[in-house]
Image (tube, rainbow, N blue to C red):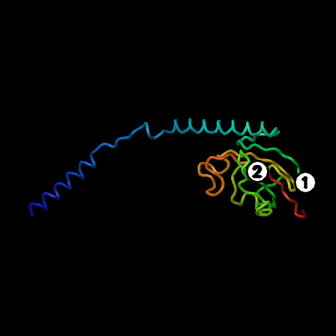
Amino acid sequence: MIIRVSIIALLLIILNSCRSAPEQKNDKSVPGKKEMAELNRYLIQKDRERIENYIERRDLRMTESPSGLWYQIIKEGNGKLLTDNDKIIMEYNCSLLDGTICYSSDESGPEELIVGRSEMPAGLNQGFRLLKQGGEAVFVIPPYLAYGLKGDGNRIPARSVIVYEIRLLNGND
């Protein structure tokens, strides 16, 4: 009986001391909001520099959208600009800045999708809205508009800038 009471008393002391022990934060190991915002600005700036170098090396004539999507319309296409729920068929190459092809319609065939409804990077969805049926374009998409910190879990690594070369096919192509 004395042993049981001693064990219970010891457990109560341990539980009580755990509850009253102050939580220690190591502010140096966990960045705060200010540090995270600064890191994000730095990463966005580095991505921008990589994109600008890519554009310069390839002698492209690209425009930057307010969101940070870079684009060059190669061929206008016909009709109205694409909007949500427009069905498109496209030929494409998706590559990294170093030229590594990640995905291509050369291996999978033309892809059919619906603008605004299909699983795709936000930057690509924005880019489609700059095109008309039959249009062609090059989009350079920074990580925050592409697959972000994780990549796509398959062929696109984490924090990758991706390049899409798109050719929209008309319904009768």
Position of 119 with respect to 24 (left or right) is: right
Q: Which mark is residue 164?
A: 2
For mark 2, give the secondary structure.
strand
| Tag 1: amino acid | Asn
Which residue: 52% across, 36% down?
35
Compared with 4, 37 (above or below) is above
Position of 5 with respect to 44 (left or right) is: left
Which residue: 62% across, 46% down?
159
Compared with 119, 59 (above or below) is above
Q: How many marks?
A: 2
Structural crowding at the residue carrying mark 2, measured as other residues with C-alpha within 10 Å and reported as few (<14), some (14–19) or many (≥20): many
| Tag 2: amino acid | Tyr
For mark 1, give the secondary structure.
strand
Residue 48, x across and y down, in percent? 69, 38
- Badges 1 and 2: C-beta atoms under 8 Å apart? no
Residue 146, x across and y down, in percent? 67, 50
Which residue: 88% across, 60% down?
170
Q: Residue furthest left?
A: 2
Residue 79, x across and y down, in percent? 89, 54
Which residue in the protein does label 1 denote?
78
Compared with 30, 87 (above or below) is below
Residue 142, x across and y down, in percent? 68, 44
Compared with 50, 93 (above or below) is below
Structural crowding at the residue carrying mark 1, measured as other residues with C-alpha within 10 Å and reported as few (<14), some (14–19) or many (≥20): few
Q: Which mark is residue 18?
A: none
Label 1 vs label 2: CA separation? 20 Å
- Which corner quadrant of the image does residue 173 belong to? bottom right
Asked whether 150 or 36 is in front, the reply is: 150
